[in-house]
Amino acid sequence: MTDDADVTALLLAWSNGEETARSRLMDAVYDELRRVARRHLRGERDAHSLAPTALVHETYVKLVDQQRVRWQNRAHFFAMAARLMRRILVDHARSRTAVKRGSGRTVVLDTVDIETPSLSIDVLALDAALDKLAAVDERQSRLVELRFFAGLTVEETAATLDIAPITVKRDWAHARAWLFRELQRQTP
C-alpha cells in the first residue's frame, strides 16, 4: 500500500493539471484497486466476463473522466472509486439479468469488525437496499459504500466522512444490521 501522503500529493498534482501525476497515481493505487475488485468478484464463476482487472480498468476510465473533481486526499479518491465500482457492478448485473433472467451477481457482505452472519446477496438487491438506507440515513449508506465497495478502514472512512472512528464503528454495525434485515425481507 502506498503512503497516504504520496497518494494525496499525486491527487493534488493531477487536480492542478499535471498530466504525468495521473499515470503515477494509477501506478501507486493499482494494486490496491485490484485487491478491492478481487474481493468484490471472488464469489463469481471462473469464466465471469468481468474480471478484477476489467473492473479496475473500467473504474480508472471513469475516474479519469472526473475532471471537475478537486481531489482532497487518498480517502476521497477511494470513496469516488467505490461509488464508481458500485455503479459498474450494478450496471453489469443489470445487463446480465436482462440477458438471463434471475441471474444477478451475488456478493458477500463480509464482517470486518462486527459479528453478523455472512450473507450472500444479489448486487442488485444490495444496490436497492442501499438506496433505501440512503433515504433513511444518507451517512450510513455512504459509510457502507466506503467500507464495502472501497475497502476503506475505519480511520479512512472517518476521515472521509469527517466523523469520529467510534461513530464509524457504531454506524457500520447499525447499517449492516439494517441491510441484513432488509435483504432478508427481499429473499423469498
Image: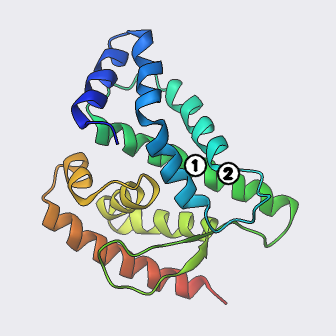
- Horizontal relation, residue 81 to residue 2: left or right: right
Q: How is the image coloured?
A: rainbow
Horizontal and vertical percent for residue 121?
59, 75
- Name the image quarter holding residue 8: top left
- Name the image quarter holding residue 7: top left
Identify the residue at image location x=47%, y=65%: 130
The C terminus sits in image quarter: bottom right
Horizontal and vertical percent for residue 15?
35, 18
- Horizontal relation, residue 58 to residue 12: left or right: right
> Please, what is the three-letter code of the amino acid marked with disc 2?
Asp
Horizontal and vertical percent for residue 57?
61, 35
The N terminus sits in image quarter: top left
User: What separation in Å lies between label 1 and label 2 (alpha carbons)?
Assistant: 6 Å
| Crowding near the residue tagged with mark 1, few <14, some 14–19, many ≥20 C-alpha atoms within 10 Å | some
45 or 14: nearer the viewer: 45
> Could you tell me which secondary element the residue under label 1 belongs to?
helix
158 or 49: nearer the viewer: 49
> Please, what is the three-letter code of the amino acid marked with disc 1?
Arg
Report the residue marked by disc 2: 91
89 or 44: nearer the viewer: 44
Identify the residue at image location x=26%, y=34%: 73
Report the residue marked by disc 1: 87
On screen, residue 104 above or below 177: above
> Could you tell me which secondary element the residue under label 2 belongs to?
helix
100 or 57: nearer the viewer: 57
On screen, residue 152 above or below 59: below
On screen, residue 30 above or below 100: above
Q: Which mark is residue 171?
A: none
| Crowding near the residue tagged with mark 2, few <14, some 14–19, many ≥20 C-alpha atoms within 10 Å | some
Identify the residue at image location x=32%, y=22%: 10
Tag 1–tag 2 contact (CB < 8 Å): yes
